Each structure stands twice: as C-alpha cells, then as structure tokens.
Amino acid sequence: MFKQSLIFSLLVLAALSCGSKENKSAPVTVEKAKPAKDGAKIFKQSCELCHGPDGKLGANGSKDLSASELDLDARIAMVTKGKGLMTPFENILSLEEIKAVAEFSMTLNATK
C-alpha cells in the first residue's frame, strides 16, 4: 500500500513538473500599444458646444479656431489650463486626450 502511494505521488509530481516546464516555455503575450485617442471625437464631446463643429461658432466668447495662429504647444496649454470662460481640461482629460484634441483643432485652421 505504501509502495503504491509512493508511486502515485511520484507520478503526480512528474506530471506537475512537466506542466510547469510547458508553462515556462509558453510564449509571453505583450499588451499591444493603445491607439491614439480620437481628437475629433473628443472635440465633438468637449469643445463643439462653444466652438462649433468647424471651430467658428464663437459661443460664450470662444475663439474662432479656424483663424487661430496658435501652434500645437500653445493649443495644448490652452486646453490644459483654459482661459476666460473656457474650462481647464487638465483634471478632465488625459494628457494624451488633450494632445489629440489640440492636434484635431489644428485641422480646423483655415490659415495654415
């Protein structure tokens, strides 16, 4: 009886050790990089109410984005900190989202 238990235990250990070797050699999956946020979608949700879909609405004193001469860094700063009645988005959007919406706002600029 003892001999059978010992053999059974050895077989179980052998099976377990084979399984762990298989797990160690299994390919490691790497999480794919997240795609950039959709600046147009964020603009529609967060900015369009005042700036309008083409950036020209001017509601609540908002600037005409199609005539803006601000570069990307200045736009990122503006979205982050806000100005006047404009909401600062630093605690609402991620830095990635702020950059995406600032980049999208550059496409509304008719002068560039």
Image (spheres, rainbow, N blue to C red):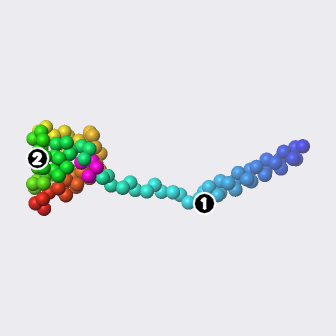
Pinpoint residue 15: horizontal percent, then vertical percent. 73, 53
Name which residue lies at 12% across and 39% down.
60
> Circle 2 sits in a helix, a strand or a loop, which is it?
loop
Pinpoint residue 38: horizontal percent, then vertical percent. 30, 52
Name which residue lies at 11% across and 44% down.
58
The disc at residue 63 is 2
How would you rate the neighbour count of disc 2 (Cα within 10 Å): few for under 14, some for 14-19, many for 20 or more? some
Give the farthest residue toward the bottom.
112
* 61 and 71: which is toward the camera: 61
From where the camera sits, is residue 31 visible? yes
Amino acid found under the numbered disc labelled 1? Ser
Position of the N terminus, as image quadrant, is top right
- Does the magenta stretch mainly form a helix, a strand or a loop? helix
Q: Sequence-wise, which precedes: disc 1 or disc 2?
A: 1
Q: Using the numbered discs, state the Cα–Cα distance from disc 1 to disc 2 in whole angstroms.
A: 58 Å
* 65 and 10: which is toward the camera: 65
Residue 21 lies in what quarter of the image?
bottom right
How would you rate the neighbour count of disc 1 (Cα within 10 Å): few for under 14, some for 14-19, many for 20 or more? few
Q: Is residue 18 left or right of residue 85?
A: right
> Circle 1 sits in a helix, a strand or a loop, which is it?
helix
Name which residue lies at 13% across and 62% down.
112
Q: Is residue 112 left or right of residue 10?
A: left
Report if residue 41 lies within the magenta region. Answer: yes
Amino acid found under the numbered disc labelled 2? Lys
The boundaries of the magenta stretch are 39-43
Pinpoint residue 80: horizontal percent, then vertical percent. 21, 44
Q: Which residue in the structure is indicated by mark 1? A: 25
User: Against 80, is 107 above or below?
Assistant: below
* 108 and 102: which is toward the camera: 108
Q: Is residue 81 left or right of residue 15?
A: left
Name which residue lies at 16% across and 40% down.
86
